[in-house]
Image: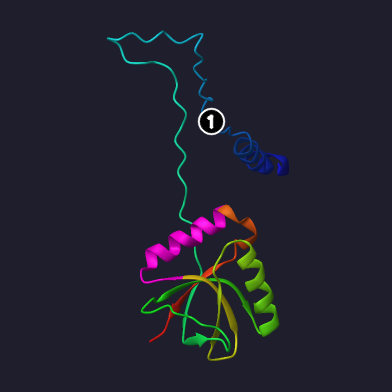
Amino acid sequence: MKNLGLLPLLLAVVVAGCKTQKIAPKPQPVSQETAAPASPTTPSTYATAPTKTYKPVSVASKEERFSAAQGETADYGSNKYFVIMGSFSVLENAKRLKATLTEENFHPVILMNESGMYRVCGNSYAEEAAARAKIADVRGKFPKYSDIWLLIKKQ
C-alpha cells in the first residue's frame, strides 16, 4: 500500500526529467557549387556574409576642476573635454608617461586637479563626440591605452 503512494511521485519525477528541449537545426551554408548561378534577370542566390555590428565602447568620464601642472603650458582655450591617458599621484610618473607619449607622436600635457592628482592629457576638444571618437581611435590603435578616459572641465 505504501508503494502505491510513491508511484505517482516517482512517475512525476520521471516525466519531468524526460522532457526534451527542441533545438532548431543549424542553417546550412550555401556554397557556390550548390547555388544556382545568378543571371542578369534573377537575383543572386549566393549566401552573403553577415554584417558585423559593434556596440559602442563605454568610456569612463569624470568632471572636475584642474589647471596645467607647474612647468606645463596648456593652451586648450575653451575646450571642455580632455582625453586622459594616465592619472598619477606622483609628478615624476606623469612626466614618464608624457615622455613615452611624446615618442609615440602624441602631444601630451600634464594637468593637476584640486586634490593634487596629475592627469596626463593626450588632447582636448570643444565637443564631447570628438573626444569620444578620439578615445575609440586611440584604443583601436594602441591596445595598451585601453583604460583611457574622458575628463570634463568643471566650470
Seen in the picture, residue 129 relative to 73 is either above or below; the reply is: above
Residue 61 position in % (x across, y down): 48, 73
Which span of residues is magenta-colored? Answer: 124-140
The quadrant holding residue 76 is bottom left
Which residue is located at x 69 percent, y 78 percent?
93
Picture layout, residue 68 above or below residue 60: below
Residue ID for mark 1: 22
Q: Nearer the viewer, residue 144 or 4?
A: 144
The residue at 46%/32% (across/down) is: 50
Amino acid type, residue under disc 1 in the picture = Lys
Query: Which of the two residues, 40 or 109, is positioned nearer the viewer here?
Result: 109
Report x, y in % for residue 47: 45, 21
Quadrant for residue 109, please give it: bottom right
Q: Residue at x 38, y 79 (%)?
A: 77
75 left or right of 17 in image: left
Q: Which residue is nearer to you in this view: 72 or 13? A: 72
Label 1 packing within 10 angstroms: few (<14), some (14-19), many (20+): few
Colour logic: rainbow
- Residue that lies at the very extreme toward the left in this rendered image: 41
* Residue 135 is inside the magenta segment: yes
137 on left or right of 12:
left
Q: Which quarter of the rendering shows the N terminus? A: top right
Whether residue 150 appears in magenta in the rendering, the answer is no
Question: Which of 143 and 61 lies nearest the eye of the viewer?
Answer: 143
Q: Would you say the magenta stretch is mainly helix, strand or loop?
A: helix
Residue 30 drawn at (x, y percent): 49, 17
Tell how many labels: 1
* Image coordinates for residue 13, horizontal then vertical, percent: 64, 41
Query: Mark 1: which secondary structure?
Result: loop
Q: Residue at x 36, y 72 (%)?
A: 126
State the quadrant of the C terminus. bottom left
